[in-house]
Amino acid sequence: MRPAKATAAAVTAVTAALGTAAAAIAAGRFASDAALKVPAGRPLPTDPRLTVHATAAGRISLTRALASLRPGTYGLSGDGTHAIVGPVLESAPHEADTVVRRLEAVTHGSLGPGDRVRLTPQVHIGDPRAALGIDYEDVTVPGELGALPAWFVPGARDTWVITVHGLGTTREHPMVVMDFLRRLRVPVLDLAYRGDPGAPRSPDGLGHLGETEWRDVDAAVRHAVRHGAGRVVLHGWSTGAAMCLHTAAHSALRDRISGLVLDSPVLNWETTLRALAGARRTPGPLLPLAVRAAQGRTGLRGDRLREAADPATLRVPTLVVHGPDDTVAPWALSRRLAEQRPDLVTLHPVPDAPHGAMWNADPAGYEEVLRRFLTPLL
């Protein structure tokens, strides 16, 4: 018979082990929230916080950092504030630890010294009329979970562009290309999908990094065809790009899809989840637990995205716009896709650009590449 002390010690060890396992599971679950519970319209944890040092007419002074030195045009998001900032003003007087950028507009709230803000690729807020002066229609797309709100900008052509935002943004993000597409006379359907403001929630309340959300993009394709589109081009950012790939691979109407534009595409969800969890200071040893927790909570399977992004399955011209400095969706996967399908894939690299901000870093260059890609498809 085991002595009482030995039995007590064994019970204590088992209890400690169970406690450690439970803590690890809880930690993995919390870490997986970095990708499964990304609030729509809130900057990603990979975007560092900056401090506003001063504002003046047409200028704003920010903490000097790699983020604040990025070229181009960005949204500036804070607690109850939003602004649009332009390029760095190198010649403007400033302290050694600050950067002065052009302040294009304060679109919501007010900015003052000490405010904490982040640069975001979501430049515009509101609707197309309020933000850009573009006439549009509020439309409803019937989706598998219910009605999906969308903005429709009419155009004379019978090829529509369906825009699909990605992580940390809303359907306001694609407004960065809306005026450009309007000038091409292309109808634009800008979709809000499950989990977005005004759209149905996912049944489990979690994001699925495109693996289920793509069905809402499929619903948008059906809506476009029912309302006169002869063909559609899918333009997606981040996980929105993954949704476009899933739709092109699996939609019953995939023969109506004539092209894909993939901006900062998430081609491997495990890598993206690890990057977002790491940005929330998740210790490295816990990152595999975050991946397993995400699989257990959502049923995510890496092979589904690998199948959708398989170069051998691509059937339409594809423009990939991506940055080598992207820390959320690896550039190497986009480069590999282009190398394996040079007959269909055009890769346009954008240096010094964070995830989802290819237009922001070089608006004119982005629109010219997009114009050359779309022209033969219209």
Image: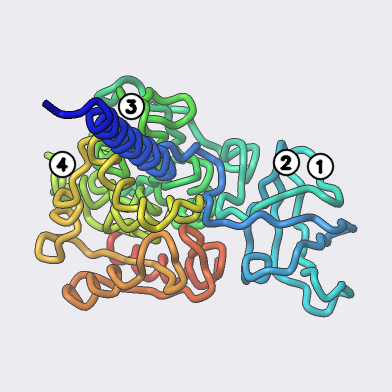
- Which residue type does callout 2 highlight? Thr
Say the numbered circle drawn on residue 251.
Answer: 4
Q: Is residue 158 visible?
A: no
Percent x, y of residue 341: 17, 73
Disc 2 marks which residue?
A: 81
Q: Give me the C-alpha separation between circle 3 and circle 1.
A: 34 Å
Q: Residue at x 18, y 45 (%)?
A: 301
Crowd rating for badge 1 (residues with CA inside 10 Å; few <14, some 14–19, many 20+): few
Which is in the foreground here, disc 4 or disc 2? 2
Percent x, y of residue 19: 34, 33
Q: Earlier in the sequence, mark 4 or mark 1?
A: 1
Question: In this figure, what is the number of numbered marks?
Answer: 4
Do the CB atoms of the residues marked 1 and 2 lie less than 8 Å apart?
A: yes
345 over 79 or under it: above or below: below
Disc 3 marks which residue?
A: 202
Crowd rating for badge 2 (residues with CA inside 10 Å; few <14, some 14–19, many 20+): some
